[in-house]
Image (cartoon, rainbow, N blue to C red):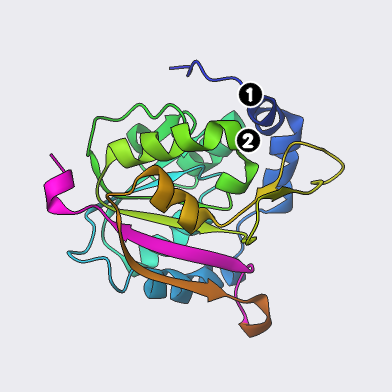
């Protein structure tokens, strides 16, 4: 399946630039180990514990590898870059049937088909004009929880990314989620700091989809 979405951002990530990112961020035991306590913290209030988890923009699955040590949930990866998808399968991060070609705007899964859907360092690379559509699509496939872990800025702004303009956008993503999907209930949020051993400086939010809104 080839999704119908094409944007300047996706062209970059599907091509050589995206493949170079994979090479720079190859999984290591130390990186995965550092992610394990971060995921244990972020999932503390996700109850009942999710049985099926989707990462939107999984790349080579650093987060999913850590999640495999934290939870017994079935793991699903959505990824636009072909090289990254092959690595996910070759490394047995997910079963081949759970490695899906696609993007946040177009997820080839049924409504409410995963218990938790999340992004980590992905929404920052989505153009502001496309962001609401991505949120609504992630909300569509999530049954119980949505988690967002991204760089934070109190005001929306764009900054250059490795010599490219139009590729990195900062904002208060938690606020954006609330404005786009006001039915969501904030369960928890926090900040990870590299100065304390975290993999990256990330602000995260965990939202719950109320039962009345699940239908």
User: Of residues 134 and 27, which is closer to you in this image?
Assistant: 134
User: Of residues 50 and 147, which is closer to you in this image?
Assistant: 147
* Residue 120, disc: none
**Residue name at image x 72 percent, y 39 percent:** 167
Q: Confirm or deny contact between disc 2 and disc 1 (CB under 8 A).
A: yes
Tally of marks: 2
Q: Is residue 71 above or below residue 133?
A: below
Question: Mark 2 or mark 1, which has the lower sequence index?
Answer: 1
Q: Quadrant of the N terminus?
A: top left
Q: Where is residue 97 in the image (x, y as percent from the top left)?
A: 33, 32
Q: Which residue is labeled 1 in the image?
A: 7
Element type at marker 2?
loop
Q: Nearer the viewer, mark 2 or mark 1?
A: 2
Quarter of the view holding residue 189: bottom left
Q: In this view, does 20 lie above or below 103?
A: below
Which residue is the extreme one toward the right?
163
Q: Which residue is labeled 2 in the image?
A: 127
Residue 93 appears in the figure: no
Around disc 2, counting alpha carbons within 10 Å, would you say few (fewer than 14), some (14 to 19), or many (20 or more)? some
Q: Where is residue 155 in the image (x, y as percent from the top left)?
A: 65, 56
Q: Where is residue 113 in the image (x, y as percent from the top left)?
A: 23, 38
Q: In this view, does 120 lie to the left or right of 159?
A: left
Around disc 1, counting alpha carbons within 10 Å, would you say few (fewer than 14), some (14 to 19), or many (20 or more)? few
**Residue name at image x 65 percent, y 60 percent:** 153
Q: What stretch is highlighted in magenta?
A: 197-215
Q: In this view, does 34 lie above or below 214?
A: below
Q: Is residue 211 one of those drawn in magenta?
A: yes
Q: Position of residue 104 (x, y in %)?
A: 47, 35
Q: In which quarter of the image is the C terminus?
A: top left
């Amino acid at each position: 399946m080839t999704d119908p979405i094409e944007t300047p951002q996706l062209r970059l990530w599907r091509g050589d630039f995206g493949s170079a990112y994979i090479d720079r961020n190859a999984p290591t035991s130390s990186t995965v180990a550092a992610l394990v306590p971060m995921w244990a913290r972020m999932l503390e209030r996700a109850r009942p514990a999710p049985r099926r988890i989707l990462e939107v923009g999984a790349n080579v699955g650093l987060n999913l590898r850590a999640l495999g040590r934290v939870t017994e949930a079935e793991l699903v990866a959505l990824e636009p870059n072909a090289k990254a998808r092959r690595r996910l399968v070759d490394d047995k991060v997910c079963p081949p049937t759970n490695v899906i070609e696609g993007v946040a705007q177009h997820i080839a899964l049924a409504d409410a088909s995963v218990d938790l859907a999340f992004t980590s360092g992905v929404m920052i690379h989505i153009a502001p004009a496309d962001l609401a559509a991505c949120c609504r699509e992630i909300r569509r496939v999530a049954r119980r929880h949505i988690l967002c872990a991204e760089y934070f800025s109190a005001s929306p702004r764009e900054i250059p990314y490795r010599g490219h303009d139009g590729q990195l956008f900062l904002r208060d993503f938690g606020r954006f989620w609330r404005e786009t999907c006001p039915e969501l209930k904030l369960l928890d949020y926090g900040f990870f700091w590299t100065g304390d051993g975290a993999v990256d400086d990330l602000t995260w939010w965990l939202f719950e989809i109320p039962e009345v809104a699940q239908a």
